[in-house]
Amino acid sequence: MSRKRRAYESGHKPKFLAIIDDTPECDRAVRFGARRMARIGGRLIMLRVIETSDMDQQWLGVADLMRAEAREAAAAMLDRHAANVRSLAGLEPECVVREGDKATEIVRLIDEDEDIAVLVLAAGTGSEGPGPLVTMLAGKPSGTFAIPIAIVPGHLSDDEIDALA
């Protein structure tokens, strides 16, 4: 059961949660979230989930090395997106790295942080559908979320996103 959202109560600030992954549309969600939070005085959380299912089948030393390399790559990816957020919105984003199942970790973070007000995803632009995260989260399980999911069309230009945010 999710905790009550407190994003707009005294002493709290609303947060938008953007998921950092390897999809080309990921930057659309980050841009929208950063610009919107800059406009309303909120914060942006960027989450990178390291999926460990492959690592659990490896020898202990190999799995530890794989985890360390994955954490290093996750930190580098978050640093790149954080630099973009700073330059385009003047915000210092909160960067979070988690290990495990992506959907589980997203829901867990939302449950833990009562200031997260919106999950921001970007839809894919290819013919294979809206993208893995939108497909995974905007379907049946989203009805149990404690917060709304904003889906940014992946084809929007920077100017179009800025005008909407």
Image (tube, helix red, strand yellow):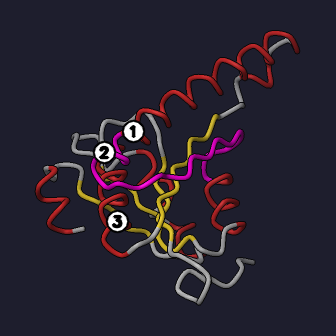
Look at mark 1 in the image and give the residue it sits on. Answer: 83
What residue sits 36% from the left and 58% below the top? 34
| Residue 23: percent from left, percent from top | 37, 36
Residue beneath label 3, please? 38
Secondary-structure class at tag 1? helix
How far is mark 2 from mark 3, CA to CA? 12 Å
Q: Which residue is mark 2?
A: 87
Q: Which quarter of the image is occupied by the C terminus?
A: bottom left
Q: Are marks 2 and 1 in contact (CB under 8 Å)?
A: yes
Residues 111 and 115: in front is: 115
Question: Above or below — where is 120 with respect to 6?
Answer: above
x, y percent for residue 121: 39, 56
* Nearer to us in this view, 158 or 79: 79
Tell me the magenta residue range: 84-103
At 71% from the left edge and 39% from the top edge, which residue is drawn? 99
Q: Secondary structure at mark 3?
A: helix
Q: How far across and how far down the image is residue 56, in percent?
A: 80, 25
